[in-house]
């Protein structure tokens, strides 16, 4: 009952978050021409500057950092050592610039992303600052084209869906206020990042006002965003009813326990709890391919994400 695309990338169907605010659609469309997405290896990309997801030592590591140092050669490490000798370690959020050595790019901009810590340690702001500071450093060095990897989504464990939202929002915001950057390329190494960045860029979203049920009681309302790229991702901010408190501890506990997996699957709930999402027009979002996630943290808005939509439901909204 899923589309080919869905089946092909079932593993990629974690989710894509929908940030409220349809007013942004037009604005994004205008600058979208400056943003590209590529699946592959960032060391092969020809741009003025490529960004490295480094660590505070700047001495190299695994992942994209290792790939950049290997492909760029000793000259990069040499510059990194000089920077460290001059300023000490490179702090999370900071961006510094070096030669790109043997790479096709002119420069490597090294930035240190946040380690994911459950979302309570200002990770989103830190990640946004990495993108912002890297873009500013590119502008300061007359770079007009820049390629980013998906910072923090590897070893540092930032949930791919949320990182994609921060990445796209921050880059979009920056280039809408600066005419100095001609092109930003998101270089995604794996399917998940590719899918989520793409989802963030294909921003056309239909709003489906819905209710979240548990044991046939309404525990919250949510304006679900239904994306138009056929991938069947729904998400939105939950406005809890007073019945919600009965389930709060369960959501928080389950989310923390499942953090590595980063998915709470609706079928895990259904046996005992009968969770379901029903649109106000009566459509029930049954058997999502990749599950239902309730992000319920102390201070954040509660985010609901429902991933993988049945074809029949899809057809109902996209005629
Ligand atoms: N091109 C583009 N993206 C890549 C490449 C590549 N060649 N290789 C991996 N990725 P990570 P982090 C993707 O772990 O999470 C390092 O050891 C990868 O799939 O490289 O910010 C540093 O030294 C993932 O989506 O960086 C730090 O210690 C993304 O790049 C630490 O890891 C980022 O994954 C930084 O962790």
Image (cartoon, helix red, strand yellow):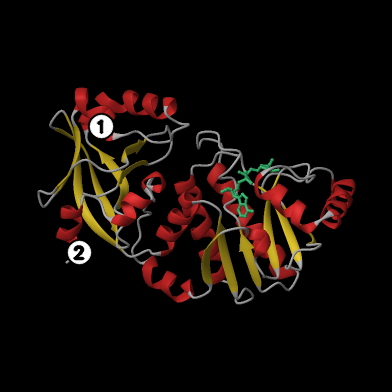
Q: Are marks 1 and 2 in contact (CB under 8 Å)?
A: no
Q: Which residue is mark 1?
A: 267
Q: Can you give x and y, in whole percent of width and height, for residue 52 in the image?
A: 68, 54
Q: Is residue 110 left or right of residue 7?
A: right
Q: Determine the secondary structure under disc 2.
A: loop
Q: Residue at x 70, y 66 (%)?
A: 49
Residue 302: name its quadrant. top left
Q: Quadrant of the C terminus?
A: bottom left
Q: Is residue 119 above or below residue 250?
A: below
- Residue 178 visible in image: no
Q: Can you give x and y, in whole percent of width and height, for residue 169 in the image?
A: 49, 59
**Earlier sequence position, callout 1 versus callout 2:** 1
Q: Can you give x and y, in whole percent of width and height, for residue 43 in the image?
A: 68, 60
Q: Is mark 1 within 8 Å of ligand 1?
A: no
Which label sits on residue 160? Answer: none
Q: Is residue 159 above or below residue 267?
A: below
Residue 41: name its quadrant. bottom right
Q: Residue at x 9, y 48 (%)?
A: 282
- Residue 194 visible in image: yes
Q: Residue at x 24, y 58 (%)?
A: 207
Which label sits on residue 318? Answer: 2
Query: How many angstroms separate mark 1 from mark 2 (CA)?
Result: 26 Å
Q: Is residue 212 above or below residue 148?
A: above
Q: Can you give x and y, in whole percent of width and height, for residue 91 in the image?
A: 73, 44
Relative to the observer, which residue lies in front, 261 or 281? 261
Q: Determine the secondary structure under disc 1.
A: helix
Within 10 Å of disc 1 (Cα), the crowding (few <14, some 14-19, many 20+) is some
């Amino acid at each position: 009952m899923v589309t080919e695309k869905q089946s092909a990338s079932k593993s990629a169907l974690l989710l894509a978050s929908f940030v409220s605010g349809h007013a942004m659609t037009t604005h994004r469309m205008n600058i979208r021409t400056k943003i590209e997405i590529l699946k592959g290896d960032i060391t092969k990309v020809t741009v003025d500057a490529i960004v490295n997801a480094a660590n505070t030592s700047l001495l190299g590591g695994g992942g994209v950092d290792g790939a950049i140092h290997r492909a760029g050669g000793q000259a990069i490490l040499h510059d990194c050592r000089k920077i460290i000798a001059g300023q000490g370690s490179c702090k999370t959020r900071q961006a510094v610039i070096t030669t790109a050595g043997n790479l096709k790019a002119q420069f490597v901009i090294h930035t240190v992303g946040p380690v994911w810590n459950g979302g309570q340690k200002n990770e989103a702001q830190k990640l946004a600052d990495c993108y912002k500071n890297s873009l500013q450093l590119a502008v300061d060095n007359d770079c007009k084209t820049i390629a980013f990897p998906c910072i923090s989504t590897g070893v540092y464990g930032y949930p791919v869906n949320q990182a994609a939202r921060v990445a796209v929002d921050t880059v979009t915001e920056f280039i809408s206020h600066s005419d100095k950057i001609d092109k930003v390329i998101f270089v995604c190494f794996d399917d998940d990042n590719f899918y989520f960045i793409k989802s963030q860029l294909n921003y056309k979203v239909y709003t489906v006002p819905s209710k979240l049920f548990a044991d046939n009681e309404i525990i919250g309302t949510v304006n679900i965003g239904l994306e138009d790229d056929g991938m069947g991702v729904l998400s939105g901010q939950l406005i809890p009813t007073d019945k919600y408190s009965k389930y709060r501890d369960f959501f928080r506990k389950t989310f923390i326990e499942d953090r590595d997996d980063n998915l709470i699957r609706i079928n895990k709930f259904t046996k005992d709890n009968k969770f379901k999402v029903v649109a106000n027009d009566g459509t029930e979002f049954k058997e999502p391919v990749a599950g239902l996630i309730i992000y319920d943290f102390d201070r954040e808005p509660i985010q609901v994400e429902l991933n993988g939509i049945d074809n029949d439901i899809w057809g109902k909204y996209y005629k």
